[in-house]
Image (cartoon, rainbow, N blue to C red):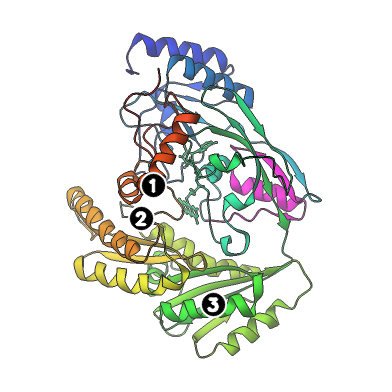
């Protein structure tokens, strides 16, 4: 829709009528916070921002958009980083922000389940679960901004996936507003339910292209009473992965995190904050943050100490946190590295995965290729290696022009994805496809899979109004 057309004015007036009490934003200064993502790299110009306060209001907005053929983009906390949650740069898309639909409807410590609205900030959902001595295990750096609907739409992972699974594994039921404004109420807390197709799976990881999630029933777990963390130094990524394989056997499913940081990344954190000294006496090429947790009366400290002593052929040095505060400090190195890596500027982000058995090979090959081909850039690798998932980011040299950066990022991404392809991995393990990775995704997806994806999209969104151009290209001739 042309942003200055009379049709726009009519659409705005109609939307205003279904969103009483300031639920529709149209002034430029009001749109600004909804127009740029966490990184600042992705921005667009929405037609307006709808902020429904209930599922009924969300449905009314969607019905109206369907009648008037207004494209929409559902929005959570804007931490997704693939250009999916901001409006397209050309204008014309209505952002549906779920930020006012943020209630925790239920926490049930007997069902070990909660029902939470899509706009609830992940950290708030986690706190609500903790108040009932339960754990919502989705855990990652942006949890203070990301919202539950965004977590579902991106099938978020995080640090505890190796123990509890991805968001997909934690969703028991969903409530979704469909493209025509109907509401599908699939909210239930059943653990077992084999009544026909598992419809909720369609919307998980769909990046808002198949429906607007308004609420979710999520699995909870007992809140761990004991947590032990170790910062471990190793001579190589291969040793880190060998240690992980051993930990899976020796510590069972008590391993809740196994985070890899290479020396370059640790140095970014050390230089960024005066209060973060080198954590060990000497520098090592590779570090791992390993966490064990349980609610059972098990001597976790003894288990961790025995494990590390038995693994002395792999472990070069290490320290076990003596308190929760010290454990938080270990994780602060990781968080600081993530925040400081780009020096406030643009950099190439990737979130690839390969089979766990190939992860050390991936790191060796990709880092070697990047350093050979782009010696002026800094390549940083870190990640949730227990899931075979690594962020391999490329930071341009200081003073690089915007054109030089764009060219570097394109070439470096090819270099990284070539290694991913060779090892039969995935170009996106976490952030999704959005608009940013569409070309790379389409070129790697076989015809049958693409045909199924287009069929699904047409079936659920025949007018092509839901997040057009994300994951799949916008249809040339949507049904009118
Ligand atoms: C510092 C940092 C660390 C991160 N670490 C991790 C990590 O460890 N693991 C991981 O998986 N991700 C990680 N991410 C990525 C990101 O936080 C997740 O993808 C998150 O789940 C996105 O949630 P959001 O609310 O910010 O969604 P947004 O960015 O607002 O939206 C993301 C996508 O979801 C769609 N969407 C949002 N809400 C809805 C809804 N209600 N219904 C339908 N579609 C919707 C949007 O249209 C868009 O396509 C990280 C991001 C940052 C900035």
Q: Is residue 255 magenta?
A: no
| Quadrant in which the N terminus is drawn | top left
CA–CA distance between discs 2 and 3? 27 Å
Disc 2 on helix, strand or loop? Answer: loop
Mark 2: few/some/many CA within 10 Å (<14, 14-19, 20+): some
Residue 402's spot in the image, x, y percent?
A: 21, 48
The spot of residue 310 in percent (x, y) is 59, 89
Eyeballing the image, is 213 above or below 254? above
Task: Tell whether position 131 is magenta.
Answer: yes
SS class of the residue under badge 3? helix
Q: Which residue is mark 3?
A: 245
Rendered image: mark on residue 39: 1
In x, y percent, where is residue 184?
A: 63, 30
Q: Which segment did they paint magenta? A: 112-140
Distance, label 3 to label 1, CA atoms, is 34 Å
Marker count (numbered):
3
Badge 1 local density, few (<14 within 10 Å), some, or many (20+)? some
Number of the front mark, 3 or 1:
3
**Image height of 36 relative to 333, above or below:** above
Where in the figure is residue 132, as x and y percent of width and height? 77, 51
Q: Residue at x 81, y 51 (%)?
A: 110
- SS category of the residue bearing label 1: loop
Q: Closest to the observer: 217 or 323?
A: 217
Q: Nearer the viewer, mark 2 or mark 3?
A: 3
- Residue 376 vs 144, above or below: the answer is below
Q: Which of pointers 3 and 1 lies earlier in the amino acid sequence? A: 1
Q: Which residue is mark 2?
A: 349
Residue at mark 2 to residue at mark 1: CA–CA distance: 10 Å
């Amino acid at each position: 829709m042309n942003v200055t057309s009379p049709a726009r004015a009519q659409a705005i007036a109609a939307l205003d009528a279904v969103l009483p009490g300031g639920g529709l934003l149209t002034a430029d200064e009001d749109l600004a916070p909804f127009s740029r993502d966490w990184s600042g790299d992705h921005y667009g110009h929405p037609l307006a921002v709808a902020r429904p306060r209930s599922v009924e209001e969300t449905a009314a907005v969607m019905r109206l958009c369907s009648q008037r053929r207004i494209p929409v983009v559902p929005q959570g906390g804007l931490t997704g980083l693939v250009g999916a949650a901001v409006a397209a740069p050309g204008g014309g898309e209505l952002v549906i922000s779920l930020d006012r639909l943020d209630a925790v409807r239920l926490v049930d410590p007997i069902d070990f389940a909660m029902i939470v609205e899509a706009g609830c900030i992940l950290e708030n959902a986690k706190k609500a679960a903790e108040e009932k001595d339960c754990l919502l295990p989705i855990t990652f750096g942006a949890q203070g901004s990301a919202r539950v609907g965004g977590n579902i739409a991106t099938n978020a992972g995080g640090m505890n996936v190796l123990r509890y699974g991805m968001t997909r594994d934690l969703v028991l039921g969903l409530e979704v507003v469909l493209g025509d404004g109907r509401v599908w109420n699939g909210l239930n807390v059943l653990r077992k339910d084999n009544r026909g197709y598992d419809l909720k799976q369609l919307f998980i990881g769909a990046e808002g292209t198949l429906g607007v999630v308004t609420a979710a029933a999520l699995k909870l777990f007992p809140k761990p009473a004991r947590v032990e963390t170790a910062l471990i130094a190793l001579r190589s990524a291969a040793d880190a992965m060998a240690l992980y394989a051993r930990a899976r056997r020796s510590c069972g499913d008590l391993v809740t995190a196994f985070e890899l940081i290479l020396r370059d990344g640790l140095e970014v954190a050390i230089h960024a904050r005066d209060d973060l000294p080198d954590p060990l006496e000497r520098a090592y090429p590779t570090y791992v943050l390993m966490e064990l947790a349980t609610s059972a009366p098990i001597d976790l400290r003894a288990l961790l100490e025995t494990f590390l002593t038995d693994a002395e052929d792999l472990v070069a040095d290490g320290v076990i946190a003596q308190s929760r505060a010290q454990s938080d400090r270990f994780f602060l190195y990781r968080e600081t590295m993530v925040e400081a890596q780009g020096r406030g500027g643009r950099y190439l982000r990737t979130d690839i995965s390969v089979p766990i058995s190939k992860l050390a090979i991936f790191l060796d090959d990709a880092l070697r290729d990047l350093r050979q081909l782009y010696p002026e850039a800094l390549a940083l690798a870190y990640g949730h290696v227990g899931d075979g998932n690594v962020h391999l980011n490329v930071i341009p040299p200081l003073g690089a022009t915007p054109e030089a950066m764009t060219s570097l990022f394109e070439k470096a991404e090819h270099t990284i994805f070539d290694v991913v392809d060779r090892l039969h991995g995935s170009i996106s393990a976490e952030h999704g496809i959005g608009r940013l990775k569409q070309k790379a995704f389409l070129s790697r997806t076989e015809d049958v899979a693409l045909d199924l994806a287009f069929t699904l999209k047409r079936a659920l969104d025949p007018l092509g109004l839901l997040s057009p151009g994300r994951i799949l290209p916008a249809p040339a001739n949507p049904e009118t």
